[in-house]
Amino acid sequence: MNSPETAPVTTPVSPLPHHPVAVIGAGLGGLTLARVLHVNGIDAAVFDLDASAGARAQGGMLDIHGDTGQAALRAAGLHDAFLAKVHRGGQALRVLDRQARVLRDEGDDGTGDRPEIDRGDLRDLLIGSLPDGMIRWNAKTTAVRPIGAGRHEVTLADGSAFTTDLLIGADGAWSRVRPLLSDAVPAYTGISFVEIDLLDADARHPDSARLLGGGMFFALGDDKGFLGHRESDGSLHLYTALRVAEDHLDGFDFTDADAAKTALLEHFADWAPELRRLVTDADGPLVPRLIHALPVGHRWDRVPGVTLLGDAAHLMSPFAGEGANLAMIDGADLGRCLAAHPGDTEAALAAYEEVLFPRSEATAQDSADGLEVIFNDRAPQPLLDMFAGFDAQQG
């Protein structure tokens, strides 16, 4: 008599971890969203590719605007804490021409409405306001896909995955989430930066420290220039800017700081020695930054269970000074819309995008226009004319 066949033993497949709300990216926009959700009693998980909160320097000063960035901080319950961290004197402004003649010099008397803060300090403030474990560090998103009924599956670089009811792309210029909504990709704007720093400027670079002043600095002419600011640690952070072809900086050897400086200075051969010295005296490596932007007016049709904020939604050039501010107000608005429509995610997303699209379109156009103001053969005169126009409106 034959023995009966033994039925195969099957092990049930464990379901993937599930998060009702998943935010991809712990930049300023994603963190502001997480904080506003938290203060409204809505749980979320934030996933970021950095190994830890301090894995890389954040760099740069930000001027935080009253109707966007500061409004977002008020919604997050952090405005007073923000004011305690601002850089006093950071709202000063200086505009020079290529011969280092000072053509506009504004002081900071403390009455301005755009206080400056170190980006790292602002990020730390937001991170510190969130519960432990809300941010999953070392969690790089490599793939996302819809799985029906507005839900999505997210795969991470370590091979793990999770599902979510609401997927929010706060993951910057080269967003992994954006293709779920849009075929748009960032395009080169025609402007390339080379980022430089002069450390401990008052002691080590006193002439350059006096040249830049206490806040924002522009030295412009003939489709190029220097854009910079004094940071709260006493260093000078500058972007040397060129209107060049997208592959132009490929010819620079950025592994050799001296060689990169020599190549960069060829573009400023007839500029004032004190401006050229900003490059020759730079400390540390020179870092290339090509400026990209999404199309002005970028938007998408409503797709269930997913949306974008910040650069993922509306990457633009930095020449309106609004990128970080928009990311933060995006996050705050999305959080408020979700709180105002409990149980109806689609109504919340529709309400959020109704505000997002026209605001980002207007600001992206301002950024594109600002690029043309700063980089042209009459610079810095168009920038001076723009500031004079602001003065007339306020006067």
Image (cartoon, helix red, strand yellow):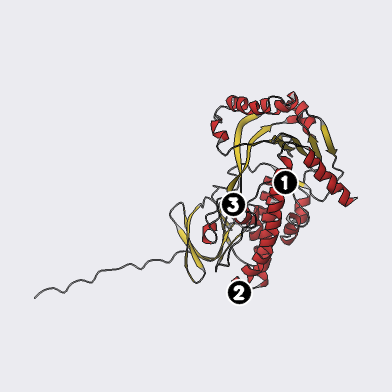
Query: In the displayed structure, does residue 287 sit left or right of residue 83?
Result: left
Q: Secondary structure at mark 2?
A: loop
Mark in the foreground, 2 or 1: 1
The amino acid pointed to by label 1 is Gly
The residue wearing badge 1 is 370
The residue wearing badge 2 is 344
Numbered badge on residue 208: none
Residue 148 in picture, x, y percent from top left: 47, 70
| Of 323 and 115, the residue lying toward us | 323
- Identity of the residue drawn at 52% across and 58% down: 179
Mark in the foreground, 2 or 3: 3
Numbered badge on residue 172: 3
Q: Earlier in the sequence, mark 1 or mark 3?
A: 3
Residue 273 appears in view: yes
Q: Secondary structure at mark 3?
A: loop
The reply to whether the C-beta atoms of the residues labelled 1 and 3 are less than 8 Å apart is no
The amino acid pointed to by label 3 is Gly
Residue 77 in picture, x, y percent from top left: 73, 60
